[in-house]
Amino acid sequence: MSYVPSKVLSNEQVYGNYYILVVRTLRKLRKTPLPPQFSMVWVPGVDLIPLSYAYYENGLAKFFYKVVGEGTKSLSLRKPGDVIAISEPIGQSFIEIEKPVFLVGGSGIAPVLYYTKYLESFSGIWGVKHGELAEALITRFPKLKVLAVASEDCTFGFCGKLTDYLDKLNLNSNELVLVSGPTEMVKRVCSWLKGRSVRSGLVIAETLVKCGLGVCGSCVIGGLLLCRDGPVVGCEAF
Amino acid sequence: MIEKLETRVAGLQLVHPVMNASGILGYLPEHADLMASWGVSAIVSKTFTREPREGYNPPIIVRLRCGSLLNAVGLSNPGRAGLRPFVESAKKHGVPVIVSVGGVSVNDFIDVAITAEEVGSSAVELNMSCPHFKGGGLELGRDPVAVFNTVREVSSAIRIPVIVKLGLSDRIVDASVKALEAGARALTLINTVRGMAIDVHSFKPLLTNVYGGLSGKSIHPIAVWAVYSVYKETLADIIGVGGVFTWKDAAELILAGSRAIQVGTALVYRGPDAVRNIVRGLNVWLRNIGGRSLQDLVGVAHER
């Protein structure tokens, strides 16, 4: 990737291991990112991390991320004023859609945050382990309110897992369902969708993205390269 | 007219001269389908080593100015156990499948080459020139004696053609001569050239591995020189590679002495149609110069 140097404006812990990074690019991106595109975020000398856009406007970019390893840990330690770098947006945008139903697990909410800027209307369920995460993000992205929340610790919304509430969804056959979350959750939701007559079940997929250029082949999924053709793929890839 | 583009290299009959360069995808069965969709005349795998390799941490590939890439992927690959699934998937597409083979010791090369032959590969390309593979890359390929020993052992262990991929060094002609003496049927020239880039905002090297291999437009004239120099000395079958973006770049390498061409970085900058566009351009070129066949133009730049 060629990187666009970017200054950290804030890097706030939202809840537990979840953070929101806000950066200002030091030059304009050639292409404006659209949901659910992502960028490779370079922590100089440490790692390169694929992160979905939670927001972008005129060089101001927000990323919602979870600390899972050394790279994201190091990213979480970047302070306002530090310089990191981001790649041009990667993948295909997918916004010509109406009233999608989001079925989201945990940090799979990241690309949905940016969708709230572009979609007039949407619905769905977001399953979280801890209700506090949902509370904290809804405060920052109020449009998320339209999503039902299922919390495993029973502190917010429904009590239980997202998959416990799927059967309560009233899906009609015209509905476009967008699934986003950890692989195991996506698999379960996709196999549940198989028996339903929805217009299409699509996934905002996550794979191991190493180069972001279509060269290294590590992000291959369902015969496609996620970094070039994704991140939206059909449920059949899972 | 397309038959004028036919070529033969290392005993492999190709419908046109343009194959992919090793290192663009090429180690999983799903990759083979994507590679075939580019319209290549042979599918060249990523370098396989005896054991699986993780590769380096990202950034592993960065875009540079002037249509170039800098990479230090670290030869990540599933090891020789991954050869059968990849080769079987690639063979479905009806073009020769060339397996790139890497290693440090002679036995590494032999083991992977034997597996490649067993699973049905059309030829092997010994990668003796990776600029960031300690002990097994350029260090090996720049030493004519080591090249001779490795190529001789591999050539006597398998029946399929052995191609040797060499990189830029002050011994490139000597190493080429030794590879051919040892039984190489063709040479692939050149690999990426060692290089480095530093981010001026964070003061850090861009690649996690610090240095890596430069490919793309910046190395094209080096490739032309290397092919020209080796062809002049050996008249060998050469597969020319280095910064081929357009038919003109390919034509230059053919006139310098290449019988086939590999394309890598252009697939990133020009997208999946890069190969078809080059082939189409070569076809128009042949027609414009009086319907000569490509084979007649190999090394013509040497004529005085």
Image (cartoon, rainbow, N blue to C red):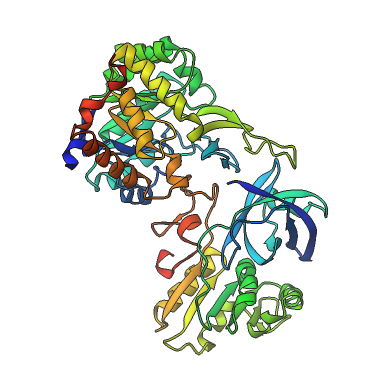
Seen from the viewer's position, the closer of residues A194 and B26 is B26
**How many numbered discs, if any?**
0
Q: Position of residue A47 (x, y in %)?
A: 66, 45
Outermost residue, right direction? A80
Seen from the viewer's position, the closer of residues A238 and B69 is B69
The residue under the point 63% across, 52% down is A49
Q: Kindly indicate the quadrant of the structure image that contains residue A164.
A: bottom right
Q: Kindly indicate the quadrant of the structure image that contains residue A67.
A: bottom right
On screen, residue A158 above or below B133: below
Determine whether, in the image, residue B10 is placed left or right of residue A146: left
The residue under the point 25% across, 41% down is B283
Determine whether, in the image, residue A162 is placed left or right of residue B119: right
The residue under the point 49% across, 17% down is B169
**From the image, which quarter does the C terminus of chain B lie in?**
top left
Q: Would residue B179 be visible to someone looking at this image?
A: yes
Determine whether, in the image, residue A182 is placed left or right of residue A82: left
Q: Position of residue B151 (x, y in %)?
A: 34, 17
**From the image, which quarter does the N terminus of chain B lie in?**
top left
Q: Position of residue B297 (x, y in %)?
A: 25, 26
Determine whether, in the image, residue A32 is placed left or right of residue B92: right
Q: Position of residue B109 (x, y in %)?
A: 38, 24
Q: Would residue B108 be visible to someone looking at this image?
A: no
The residue under the point 58% across, 74% down is A104
Seen from the viewer's position, the closer of residues B154 and A129 is B154
Seen from the viewer's position, the closer of residues B141 and A16 is B141
